[in-house]
Amino acid sequence: MNRLSEVDLSQRLSKKEATERLDAALERLLRLRLTLGGQIGERRLGPPVCVVFEGWDASGKGGAIKRLVRPLDPRHVRVAQFAAPTYDEKRHHFLWRFWPVLPGWGGMTVLDRSWYGRVLVERVEGFATEEQWSRAYEEIVEFERTLAAEGMIMVKFWMHVSPEEQLRRFEDRAGDPLRVWKLTDEDWRNRDRRPQYEVAVEEMLARTDRPEAPWHVVPGDDKRLARVVVVETVCAAMERGLC
């Protein structure tokens, strides 16, 4: 299990190439989204699209999500963010709280964090028992298989950054009065536990990567490259879903 170590974090894009590729991908995305939503083309609803973002703290999830939805009409896409479950949510199965935001035919949802919290933070921090997080892999696989069988296009991203780049971003946030709110004590604690999280991430990638819901590990040390990769990957998945 060494998928993270195989990622080339030294990759870079020039500003010019990044701008050209991102602009082209965003136009492509807009056309695909309008087609799947029934606004253009044959004017019939296409399959739902669900894009899942997981990753290290300060790995660029927020910036990638902003670029991904930038060309889209807010009526045609939903962005949902998930933090720790509430008291009431804990009374239900851990997947229960995600159902209401899933897209229907013609819809698109982008998830900032997801059901993978069960096998990541809840595992590492001890919020779930070993029996709970151990069985969650198959529960998640079956959940996603059910969604895919109903036609859903699923794209899952792990935004990957090096410890050195993460530290640099933490320090940048700490020194910026307009971004310091994005840095919490929990972020620093999670960084201290990175070795434990790496074990959890590797097992997650190995056990929940399926053809109908594949993982895409995005090299995130260069934000420009990461954003281009995200949008181009979503476009490719949508095009396959239209075939």
Image: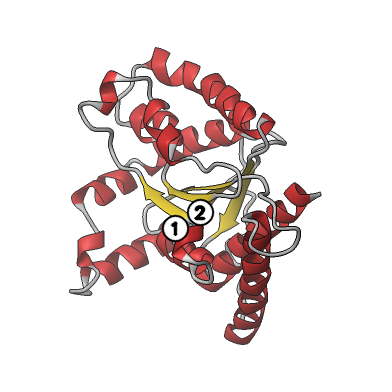
Task: Evaluate whether residue 89 shows in this view.
Answer: yes
Rendered view: 147 above or below 188: above
Q: Position of residue 118 (x, y in %)?
A: 40, 29
Q: CA distance from mark 1 to mark 2?
A: 7 Å
**137, 171: nearer the viewer:** 137
Q: Residue at x 47, y 57 (%)?
A: 162
**Do the CB atoms of the residues marked 1 and 2 lie less than 8 Å apart?**
yes
Q: Position of residue 191 (x, y in %)?
A: 33, 48
Q: Residue at x 47, y 33 (%)?
A: 200
Q: Quadrant of the N terminus?
A: top right
Q: Residue at x 50, y 38 (%)?
A: 201
Q: Position of residue 17 (x, y in %)?
A: 65, 82
115 horizontally vs 211: left or right: left
Which element carries disc 1, helix, strand or loop? helix
Q: Residue furthest right?
A: 243
Residue that label 2 marks: 159
Amino acid found under the numbered disc labelled 2: Met
Q: Position of residue 138 (x, y in %)?
A: 56, 20
Amino acid found under the numbered disc labelled 1: Lys
Which of the labelled discs sits on residue 61, or is there none?
1
Q: Residue furthest bottom?
A: 16
242 horizontally vs 97: left or right: right
Mark 2 neighbour density, 10 Å: few (under 14) some (14–19) many (20 or more): many
79 horizontally vs 51: left or right: left
Rendered view: 52 above or below 75: above
Q: Earlier in the sequence, mark 1 or mark 2?
A: 1
Which element carries disc 2, helix, strand or loop? strand
Mark 1 neighbour density, 10 Å: few (under 14) some (14–19) many (20 or more): many
- From the image, state whether disc 1 or disc 2 is nearer to you: 1
Residue 132 lies in quadrant: top left
Rendered view: 19 above or below 39: below
Q: How is the image coloured?
A: secondary structure
